[in-house]
Amino acid sequence: MSLLTCTDLSHTFVGRRRALDGVSFTAEPGEIVGVVGPNGAGKTTLLRILAGELDPAWGGAAVGGRRCGTREGRALTGYAADPPLAPPELTGLEWLRYLASHCARGPAERLDIIRAAIELGALEEYVGRRIAEYSRGMAQRLALAAAAMCARKLVLLDEVLSGIDPLVARALRRSIAKLAGAGRLIVLASHDLSTIEQLATRTLVLLGGRLVADLSMAALLGERVAELSLNGGALASSQWLLHRFRGATRTGDGIAIPLTGGLTIEQILEQCHAQRIAVGASRIRYRRLEDILVAGAEAVR
């Protein structure tokens, strides 16, 4: 049995379109599962359901065989929301002590849990300050530490790597990888596609509440894309290329075409020549998550 199982998860907020629409997937210990999509795609709704903060309208989710939202399911799960939620009048240490008191089985274990959380979040310099004085990066460190400290199986992270400086982001990426290496399942929602590409072992792409792709990052980053810059009036002919090549998407001044099924850039250029489409420049690069999002957004228009 998988550690996390989501079956036909759907939810609609009053007066709004469906936030989640039949989302199903499974995940295993040690995975870092990225969740990406534009604003309103359903990322936060998915994490809130997994955290037990929101009951789905249809379908269900379970962690370790326990339904998400039950007392048993919550005991296996930690959640860092966006923005981070912590009482501003407390110090970081006071907040961690409070959280540890709910999951530790005695004073010695509580002390061990707090020490591990401080180390994970690299909070040694800041843990004695009031949370109201924390910068965005410090608050994100605390949120990660708090989410992980009592979560025995599943750690949910909503935008914990956004809006922080590169050095803090690198430290948090290392901490997240450390959690996964210890056997935790990490579900990480983010707008930062480059971070997801660096960190995730697998990525779920949500568009309009639907799961449109479930990607192995190793497979994705092994795919190649031909990028063509089109001269002047050739941009008007780009529609032919979009229809001719599956998965093709527009770029700023041209077209990006996945090199799949044996397709080569030479074959693409030959067909452009035959159609009298003027190509100013061409190159091959590896596929990115951005390509998936752009292609998916165009497909649902």
Image: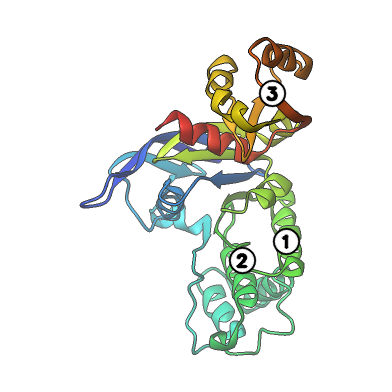
Q: CA distance from mark 1 to mark 3?
A: 49 Å
> Tag 3 or tag 1, which sits nearer the N-term?
1
Mark 3 lies on a secondary structure that is: loop
Judged by depth in the image, the label closer to the viewer, 1 or 3, is 3
Q: Give me the residue at 68% from left, 52% from top.
A: 195
Q: CA distance from mark 2 to mark 1?
A: 9 Å
Where residue 35 appears, as percent x and y from the top left, is: 55, 45
Label 1: which secondary element: helix
The residue that appears at 65% across and 25% down in the rendered structure is: 257
Taking the image as drawn, is residue 223 in sight?
A: no
- Report the side of 292 relative to 194 (left or right): left
Q: Nearer the viewer, residue 251 or 1?
A: 251
The residue pinned by badge 2 equals: 144
Task: Tell me residue 254's x, y (percent).
Answer: 64, 33
Who is closer to the viewer here, 102 or 83?
A: 83
Tell me the residue at 77%/29% (across/down). 282
- Kindly tell me whether residue 97 is visible in this rendering: yes
- Label 1 Cα crowd, 10 Å radius (few <14 / some 14-19 / many 20+): some
Which callout, 2 or 1, points at the residue further toward the start of the chain?
2
The answer to whether residue 43 is left or right of residue 129 is left
Residue 24, placed above or below residue 72: above
Type of amino acid at the residue the image marks with label 3: Ala
Cβ–Cβ under 8 Å for marks 2 and 1? yes
* Residue located beneath label 1 in the image: 175
- Amino acid carrying mark 2 in the image: Leu
Q: Residue at x 32, y 46 (%)?
A: 56
| The N terminus - image quarter | top right
Residue position marked by numbered label 3 in the rendering: 278
Picture colour scheme:
rainbow
